[in-house]
Amino acid sequence: MAEKKQLDDLSERIQQIGIADGFRLLCDLHPGKVVFSTSLGQEDQVITEIIAKNRLPVKIFTLDTGRLFYETYDLLAKTVARYQVEIKTYYPTTDSVEKLVAEVGINGFYESVEYRKSCCHARKVEPLKRALAGNEIWVTGLRSEQSPNRQKMKMLEWDAANGIIKYNPLLDWSMGQLLDYIQDHKIPYNPLHDRGFVSIGCAPCTRAISPDEDPRAGRWWWEASQKECGLHEAAPAIEK
């Protein structure tokens, strides 16, 4: 585990330079060990554009849960073609999905938070752990505006659950900044965003929201919870 002071010093240094330079610094410090997880959301599309435009040595991957929107798959194909980058896809194991469906049913996640989290674990959390294995820096598109849990996060933090340093380069970006960047750079994005889908996950678990709703209201809309799947938790303090 990285010591707290070292991580805090590195975080402060990164915040004083641009995102592309922040990437270069981390790639120099952790050669071949920097990996970016994209869900093809607007934030992730911006990061993919930055990585591709600057030819940064960052590995990119995505998680295919098996229950994504068609529009997400279409955007994946368009993104690879546009930026000429490899986006490796990780899938849940056949055994884990078969076991999940046998125990709770094909749509059992609607019945309880526990069942929903077990579905997220099989389809997202376990594949993520395989994707992160052997790496040292995990880049995400998290923004503090997205949820109360994410307001507690730092731009550079230790992810204890996965034993890796997490880098959130867009953490302080507003939605306005994000949309302006996408427009200015003509970045391809999921057309569902134009139909009220702010946060896009699996098709059965995502709905459009109204302008006055919380950005995460469309995720697991039938339950009252923290609206997280287990991939991202607020980082605990790091002991030196």
Image (cartoon, rainbow, N blue to C red):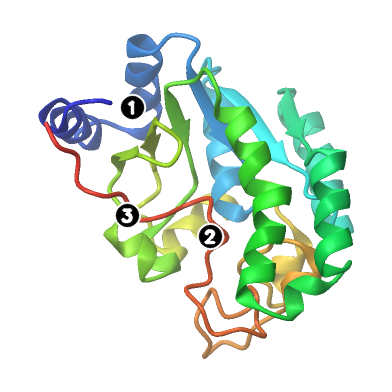
Residue 157 placement: quadrant: top left
Q: Tell me the amino acid under the disc marked 3.
A: Asp
Res 40 seen here = no
Q: Check disc 2 and report its element: helix, strand or loop.
A: helix
User: Residue at position x 30%, y 44% from top?
Assistant: 155
Nearer the N terminus, badge 3 or badge 2? 3
From the viewer's side, name the closer residue of 70 and 125. Answer: 125
How far is mark 1 from mark 2, CA to CA? Answer: 22 Å
Q: Tell me the amino acid under the disc marked 2.
A: Leu
From the viewer's side, name the closer residue of 235 and 217. Answer: 235
Nearer the N terminus, badge 3 or badge 1? 1
From the viewer's side, name the closer residue of 140 and 238. Answer: 238
Q: Tell me the amino acid under the disc marked 1.
A: Gly
Up-down relation of residue 224 to residue 89 (above or below)? below
How many numbered callouts? 3
User: Residue at position x 61%, y 38% from top?
Assistant: 128
User: Which residue bears the numbered disc 2?
Assistant: 179
Q: Is residue 46 left or right of residue 20?
A: right
Mark 2 and mark 3 in contact (Cβ < 8 Å)? no
Picture quarter with the N terminus: top left
Horizontal and vertical percent position of residue 91: 79, 38
User: Which residue bears the numbered disc 3?
Assistant: 172
Disc nearest the viewer among 3 and 2: 3
Q: Is residue 45 left or right of residue 77?
A: left
User: Residue at position x 40%, y 30% from top?
Assistant: 164
Mark 1 and mark 3 in contact (Cβ < 8 Å)? no
Up-down relation of residue 194 to residue 46 (above or below)? below
